[in-house]
Image: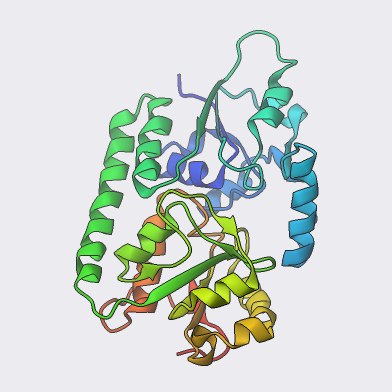
Amino acid sequence: MAPRIVSLLPSATEVVTALGMGEHLVGRSHECDYPAEVVDVPVMTRPRINPAKPSRGLHRQVSKLITKALSVFEVDADALKAAKPDIILTQHQCTACAVSEADLNAALATWTGSQPVVVSVAPETLDQVWRSFGTMADAFDLRWAGNELAERARERVEIIAMRGAALDPKPTIACVEWIDPPMIAGNWVPELVTAAGGVPVMAKKGQHSEFTTLSKLAKSDPDAMIFMPCGFDLARTMEEAAPFIARPTIAAMRAVRQKKLWAVDGNAYFNRPGPRLVTSLEILAEILNPGAFNFSREGTAWATVAGSS
């Protein structure tokens, strides 16, 4: 019998569909929006914050919730129970990114009879992301398919990385994962920058993304900055990056003066540890080396900020 699957993580939903198991999804998170057909799957979660607020306001809301040991999202326990899942996919990495394990456990606490299998992942590097495909696929007895999906991703990354390694000069890049206050993207993002032919600043492979100050960011003096706020699409990122780079401390930076500033759709790509991290690498490669790479992502997945070229 085919399993009934609930995915509470957008990247996990993408893995499920990539494995050909999308028709068995009976529940998803409110953020699961890719591929398009999953929007018809019932929603199992809701935010505890107002996502329309600007960066600073969102940061304050999230900080208050985390201080109270709450996640940013909550489970609709009744909807989850009605879905009767055999398998629930979630994460235990970040309470600001998806439903926490504590909230999920609370939603399952009153269930009687057989409990669903909970598969929780927390990748921090590209290799761990690829291996998580096999972990999730194993729950569907499709480990081989998960391994194949991972191998295809590795091969695509290696091809771009080989070309990126030969490029010179290699610009230093600050990837901004949150704008106000600024946060530098960690985990797998430094690896993507390196593979695309750049040098990441203020971040190392596998380290969590960390908040910084305007003065520290300015002092790092990167050749370029790429804005990829978690949860923001390209249009919203462009909107919020403009006032940020107008701040005197930031406006004096070399990257701003030389107009080496780009915005990307972090919500669809860089922030999701799933199959589209390969597309994220293609975006970076195209931005940093337009003469060597052309994946036709400009305008839909990335754009210049403040007339950068």
Q: Colour scheme in the image? A: rainbow
The x and y percentages for residue 39 are 61, 49
Q: Position of residue 2 (x, y in %)?
A: 46, 24
- How many labels sit on residues? 0
Instruction: Write down the quadrant of residue 149 in the picture.
Output: top left
> For this rendering, which residue is in front, 43 or 287?
287
Q: Is residue 45 left or right of residue 202?
A: right
Is residue 137 toward the left or the right of residue 118 in the image?
left
> Does the rendering let one see residue 246?
no
Q: Residue at x 49, y 38 (%)?
A: 122
Viewer-closest of 99 and 95: 95
Question: Which of the 4 image quadrants contains residue 142?
Answer: top left
Can you tell which quarter of the image residue 138 is in?
top left
Instruction: From the top left corner, tell me how far across and down residue 16 is, in percent.
Output: 45, 39
- Please indicate, yes or no, whether residue 262 appears anywhere in the rendered image: yes
Relative to 66, say whether 117 is above or below: above
Up/down of 235 relative to 8, above or below: below
Closest to the observer: 161 or 117?
161
Residue at image coords 43%, 48%:
206
**Is 104 on the left-hand or right-hand side of 210?**
right
> Residue 37 in the image: x percent, y percent?
54, 50
* Residue under the point 77% across and 27% down: 78
Quarter of the N terminus within the rendering: top left
The quarter of the picture where the C terminus appears is: bottom left
Kindly give the residue lying farthest to the top in the view shown. 113
